[in-house]
Image (cartoon, rainbow, N blue to C red):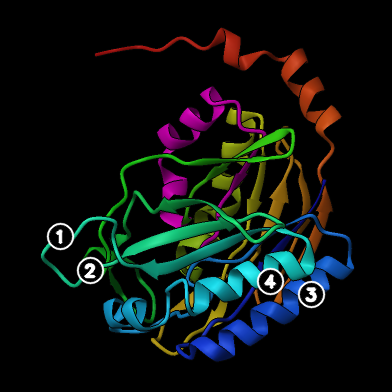
């Protein structure tokens, strides 16, 4: 399987972001990718009223139909980073879910993962204070999709710091885990690579991490360094910390099987309760 991870500098303008994302997906398809991953909030980063935007644009008659068309047009499994979606159940607030939608090559939306861990953190950077819970409601359930003979687990950005989610994906037999992100420059500089490689090694899965990069309209600066990591922790391909890029890598599942056969971590695992 050939995969692509796409690194973007997204803005507030949905249509501008969609145009750019589509051009990068075309490049990925031209390079032979079967699976493509877009970054977190690739369609609207820095928008203050995500609820109204979700109502107006992120519907089956608008942006979601565009994603479906892209997947069909380019014959891709398409992991749409994260976008603001109205929650499945009314919650009495104007909060949305940060949702990762996955489309099959026939244009069907085959699953939706709502980000579980919200980034309520103080960072020593230009923006300083991040409170995703002011805008988003947390999801509750891990989600997987089947890609022909392989299973893919879904996560988003801050989820990366919580290995329990990835351990569930290991138990569910995932061969690939995607991590669309908008990791800040400061946290990315310190922790991005080591966390991605750790998640790959401990789950013995391919990790596909598509990150935002550069300075955005809301004042935040994101780290970049999108990458694909093998089950033994090797970085197969990675981007820089400055530019938008389309990265392509081949996933060798025979290597994955050898890694798991030589070191059967899943069978050796012991769970401890306090």
Q: What residue is pinned by disc 2?
A: 95
Residue 169 falls inside the magenta stretch: yes
**Disc 4 or 1, which lies upstream in sequence?**
4
Q: What residue is pinned by disc 3?
A: 26
Residue segment shown in magenta: 157-182
Question: Secondary structure under badge 1?
Answer: loop
Packing grade of label 3 (10 A; few <14, some 14-19, many >=20) is: some
Query: Which residue lies at the image location 50% right of the left edge and 86% below the top edge?
Result: 14
| Alpha carbon separation for disc pair 2 and 4 | 28 Å
x, y (%) of residue 180?
A: 55, 59
Quadrant in the picture for the C terminus:
top left
On screen, 205 above or below 5?
A: above
On screen, 165 above or below 114?
A: above
Q: Decide which of 160, 66 is in the foreground and name it.
A: 66
| Alpha carbon separation for disc pair 4 and 1 | 32 Å
Question: Secondary structure under badge 4?
Answer: helix
């Amino acid at each position: 399987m050939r995969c692509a991870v796409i690194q973007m500098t997204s803005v507030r303008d949905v249509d501008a972001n969609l145009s750019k994302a589509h051009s990068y997906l075309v490049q990925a398809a031209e390079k032979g990718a079967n699976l493509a991953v877009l970054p977190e909030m690739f369609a609207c980063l820095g928008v203050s009223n995500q609820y109204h935007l979700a109502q107006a644009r992120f519907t089956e008659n608008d942006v979601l139909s565009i994603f479906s068309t892209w997947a069909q047009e380019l014959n891709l499994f398409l992991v749409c980073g994260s976008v603001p979606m109205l929650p499945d159940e009314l919650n009495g607030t104007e909060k949305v879910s940060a949702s990762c939608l996955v489309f099959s090559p026939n244009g069907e939306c085959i699953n939706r993962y709502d980000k579980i861990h919200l980034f309520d953190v103080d960072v020593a950077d230009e923006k300083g204070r991040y409170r995703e819970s002011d805008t988003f409601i947390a999801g509750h359930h891990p989600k997987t999709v089947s890609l022909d003979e392989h299973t893919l687990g879904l996560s988003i950005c801050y989820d990366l710091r919580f290995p329990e989610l990835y351990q569930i994906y290991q138990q569910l037999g995932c061969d690939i885990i995607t991590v669309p992100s908008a990791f800040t420059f400061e946290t990315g500089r310190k922790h991005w690579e080591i966390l991605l490689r750790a998640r790959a090694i401990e789950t013995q899965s391919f990790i596909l991490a598509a990150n935002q990069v550069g300075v955005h309209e809301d004042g935040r600066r994101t780290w970049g360094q999108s990458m694909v990591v093998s089950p033994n922790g090797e970085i197969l391909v990675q981007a820089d910390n400055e530019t938008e890029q389309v990265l392509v890598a081949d996933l060798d599942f025979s290597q994955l099987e050898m890694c798991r056969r030589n070191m059967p971590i899943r069978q050796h695992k012991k769970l401890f309760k306090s």
